[in-house]
Structures are given as structure tokens and as C-alpha cells.
Image: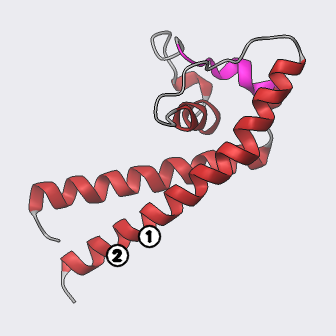
Amino acid sequence: MDYGFWLSLIAVIALLVAGISWLFFLTLSIWRIEKCILETGQSRPCPWDGLGLRAMWYAWAIGLPSKSFSDLERWMLDPNDLAPYTKPFDRVLANILLVSSYTLLACVIIDWILGVA
């Protein structure tokens, strides 16, 4: 077996996991969190959703520790606004989405630079 096969296999698996976790995270976590926030009378924390990127913003805010966010990164979504509404399951889904997405991105970059696949 060559490296191109394994890189392609990892990329396809990462793509499938990222797609499925994106849908699960959106439907099971984000919609529930936004519903809870709207019920308290606040506005949606992330009003803009370009091409479904809202899921990644929420995943960064929920999956990563809030200390890693600078003021520049808080302009769209503040992790402290989401903290009261998140559950441990949301953090698990967010981390699965982040890891699978970055694995796919790494495979694409490796293939682009090395041209193995």
C-alpha cells in the first residue's frame, strides 16, 4: 500500500465524520442553545450564517477553552454567552467536528504540498 491510498482513506473518513457531526451539532446543539437564548429574551449570539459557517463558530466557542479567545475573536460570538446553555454532550460534538474538519484540512494540505494522492 502506498501513502496516497492511506491519505485518501483518512481524508474520506474525515469528510464523512465532519459532515455527519456538522449536521448532528447543528440540529442537536446549536438549535437548542439558540432556542434557550431566545427564550430568555436575548438576541441570537451569531446572527450571521454564511454557508453554514455558524456551526464552526459555535464549535470553536464551545469546544475550545474561552481563555484562548482574544477580543478580536469575540466580535461574532462570545463563548461566555454560550456557557450557561451548553452541556457536556455539546462539547463532545463540537470537538468531534473540530478534529474531523482539521484532519480533512490537513489531508488536503499534505496532498497539495506533497502530491501523494
Region in magenta: 76-84
**Number of the label disc, if any, that sits on residue 9:** 2
Please, what is the three-letter code of the amino acid marked with disc 2? Leu
**Number of the label disc, if any, that sits on residue 112:** none
Residue 19: percent from left, percent from top:
52, 57
Residue shown at 82%/28% (left/top)?
A: 35
Distance from the alpha carbon under mark 2 to that under mark 1: 6 Å
**Residue 74 vertical position relative to residue 117 in the rendered view, above or below:** above
Q: Quadrant of the C terminus?
A: bottom left
State which quadrant residue 82 falls in: top right
Residue shown at 48%/15% (left/top)?
A: 70
- Are the residues at dot 2 and dot 1 in contact (C-beta closer than 8 Å)? yes
5 relative to 14 in the view: left or right: left
Residue 77: percent from left, percent from top:
59, 19
On whether residue 101 falls in the magenta region, the answer is no
Which secondary structure type mostly characterizes the magenta part of the structure?
helix
Residue shown at 11%/55% (left/top)?
A: 113
Total marks placed = 2
Would you call the spot at circle 2 few (<14 residues within 10 Å), some (14-19), or many (20 or more)? some
Quickly name the residue at label 1.
Answer: 13
Frontmost residue, 66 versus 98:
98
Q: Quadrant of the N terminus?
A: bottom left
Element on which disc 2 rests: helix
Frontmost residue, 26 versus 2:
26
Specify the farthest residue to the right.
39
Element on which disc 1 rests: helix
5 relative to 44 in the view: left or right: left
Residue 111: percent from left, percent from top:
18, 61
**Residue 7 vertical position relative to residue 78 in the rendered view, above or below:** below
Specify the farthest residue to the front.
51
